[in-house]
Image (cartoon, rainbow, N blue to C red):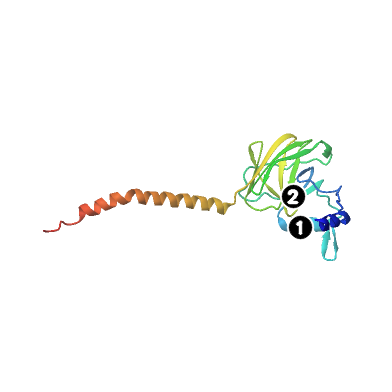
């Protein structure tokens, strides 16, 4: 015990706070829309420079602008991306109400229309609703997720339901139904075979 106390006495611990850290989600009001992923990365490379093989984006601030790809085919809902560079981001407020690996709920107060950016990895299978209405989830800044929101208060919900998972669920349901049908028909099938069998002599 004395040894532990002695070590604790002389152990220096320092805690640092980053005053420039990114939030868990934010709104932007300058949105550049491109055709696909290659165009998005080309857009970002044009606004940066190479240092030791890494791209440094010194002419692009993802906290105030975003580059988004077209909504993937099959996305639920439609909307028109609208934004205004004149909008003051000080009027925006984003609060995460619920967060899990396949579901996120956010409360948004937007000073004007913009794009909600969630800096989590984009992957096909994510869907979104804004105040209960289906909205596309846009691949944003080459890696993140973005959802368009209107001016005012909104509740944004994102859910991850991959297509293969849905197919698997339906196949499982069909399998259970087929098994139940076979079990239900088995006694009737046995009775039918017994009735059709020829009588045995004594």
Tell me the distance, in whole angstroms, between the alpha carbons under discs 2 and 1: 16 Å
How many numbered marks does the figure carry? 2
**Which part of the image, by quadrant, shows the C terminus?**
bottom left
Q: Residue 119 carries which label?
A: 2
Front residue of 4/123: it is: 4
Q: Is residue 12 visible?
A: no
Spot occupied by residue 37 in the image (x, y as percentages of width and height): 71, 56
Quarter of the rendering occupied by the N terminus = bottom right
Q: In this view, does 88 lie to the left or right of 97?
A: right
Element on which disc 1 rests? helix
Mark 1, residues whose alpha carbon is within 10 Å: few (<14), some, or many (≥20)? some
Q: Residue at x 52, y 53 (%)?
A: 168
Q: Earlier along the polypeptide chain: callout 2 or callout 1?
A: 1
Circle on res. 136? none
Coordinates of residue 58 in the picture (x, y in percent):
86, 55
The residue indicated by pointer 1 is: 41
Horizontal side of residue 66 vs 189, given as left or right: right
């Amino acid at each position: 015990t004395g040894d532990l106390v002695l070590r604790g006495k002389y152990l220096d611990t320092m805690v640092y706070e980053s005053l420039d850290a990114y939030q868990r989600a934010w709104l932007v009001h300058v949105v550049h829309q491109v055709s696909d992923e290659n165009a998005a990365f080309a857009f970002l490379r044009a606004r940066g420079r190479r240092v030791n093989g890494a791209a440094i984006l010194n002419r692009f601030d993802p906290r105030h602008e975003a580059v988004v790809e077209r909504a993937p085919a099959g996305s639920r809902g439609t909307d028109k991306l609208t934004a205004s560079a004149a909008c003051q981001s000080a009027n925006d407020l984003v609060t995460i109400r619920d967060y899990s690996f396949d579901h996120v709920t956010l409360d948004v107060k937007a000073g004007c229309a913009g794009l909600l950016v969630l800096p989590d990895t984009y992957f096909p299978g994510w869907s979104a609703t804004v105040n209960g209405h289906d909205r596309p989830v846009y691949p944003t800044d080459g890696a993140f997720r973005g959802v368009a929101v209107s001016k005012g208060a909104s509740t944004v919900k994102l859910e991850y339901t991959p297509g293969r998972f849905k197919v698997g669920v339906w196949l499982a349901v069909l399998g259970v139904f087929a098994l139940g049908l076979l079990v239900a028909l088995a006694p009737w099938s046995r009775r039918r075979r017994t009735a059709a069998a020829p009588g045995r002599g004594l």
